Image (tube, helix red, strand yellow):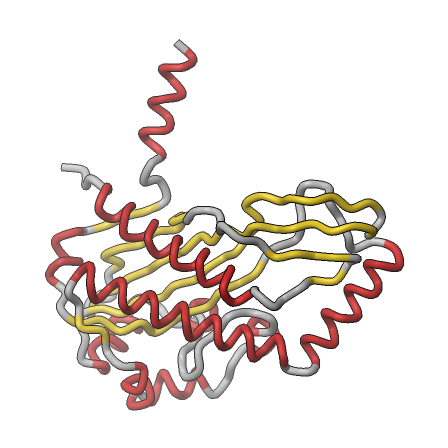
Amino acid sequence: MKKLTLLVLVALSGCAGMQVNKSQVTAAKKVAVVGYQGVLQLEDQNGNNQKNGIAGAIGASKAAADLMSGRMGERRAQQGEAGYTELTKRLQTTFQWEVAPREALATVPVYQDRLARPSKLTRMGTQTVSGVLTPGELMSMKKQELGELAKALGVDAVATVNLTYTVGKTGGFAVAGMGSTTRYPVATAHLTVVDTNGQVIWEDFAAKGKVASTGLRTTMGADLVENETEVLSEAAASAFDAVIERYQAFEEKK
């Protein structure tokens, strides 16, 4: 009986955390991706903590230097650009949508006004895209205003995507910061699509991809970032796959 109940719960939760009006989604011909951000939450939750003691202090110092030097910002920008491009490709090929070029956003005064006041604190250390607001920055706009934005852009709908990277699994071992561990990220996408009437026609809060096949190493408290973009890009692409798969599997209530 318990096994049957578990199976039912799994089946019911397969597309949990989403709402879709497929007729409106398929009716859309042109969309614009007006919000994008990727947030890293890769703190180890499994006890392999290398952030304590001397090694942790060294690692924190290196991370701070990475941030202040601008090197982290360069990687995050590269990762954001790659993710934004990959997402638009998926939307084009899956739905045959024409995705408005990013340059079109520069023609809308209300969008540019908001872009001129970026939330620097919430952008720090995250994946963002030049000329594109983050979903958080767009939260100040009501759904009706997003509908007006779609009209101003000459599209049928606007979309925002927020990616959250967490640790899918870990490997290696460290005690008091001594040793080496590897974190394998997994990305979860939150997609929202709003039409010209200000109606949410598709929202998925929990499109979780597969755990990346390669990981990010931490040695003696310091994060090794040589393969970071490659690893995070794989995780992001898998989350976008999950977005499409969950949409296709979703059955609307009659």
Residue 249, given in percent of the width and then of the height, sits at 23, 41
Q: Quadrant of residue 148?
A: bottom left
Instruction: Residue lying at the far right in this picture: please name it.
Output: 54
Residue drawn at 36 percent across, 15 percent down: 4
Residue drawn at 46 percent across, 56 percent down: 235
Instruction: Residue lying at the far top in this picture: please name it.
Output: 1
**142 above or below 105?**
above
Q: Nearer the viewer, residue 215 or 188?
A: 215
Residue 184, given in percent of the width and then of the height, sits at 56, 50
Q: Quadrant of residue 68?
A: bottom right
Quadrant where the C terminus is found in the figure? top left
> Is 47 positioned to the left or the right of 210 in the image?
right
**254 above or below 234?**
above
Quadrant where the N terminus is found in the figure? top left
Residue 201, given in percent of the width and then of the height, sits at 23, 57
Residue drawn at 60 percent across, 68 percent down: 226
Residue 58, given in percent of the width and then of the height, sits at 83, 65
**70 above or below 215?**
below
Q: Nearer the viewer, residue 185 or 252?
A: 185
Report how many numbered discs are placed on residues in the image.
0
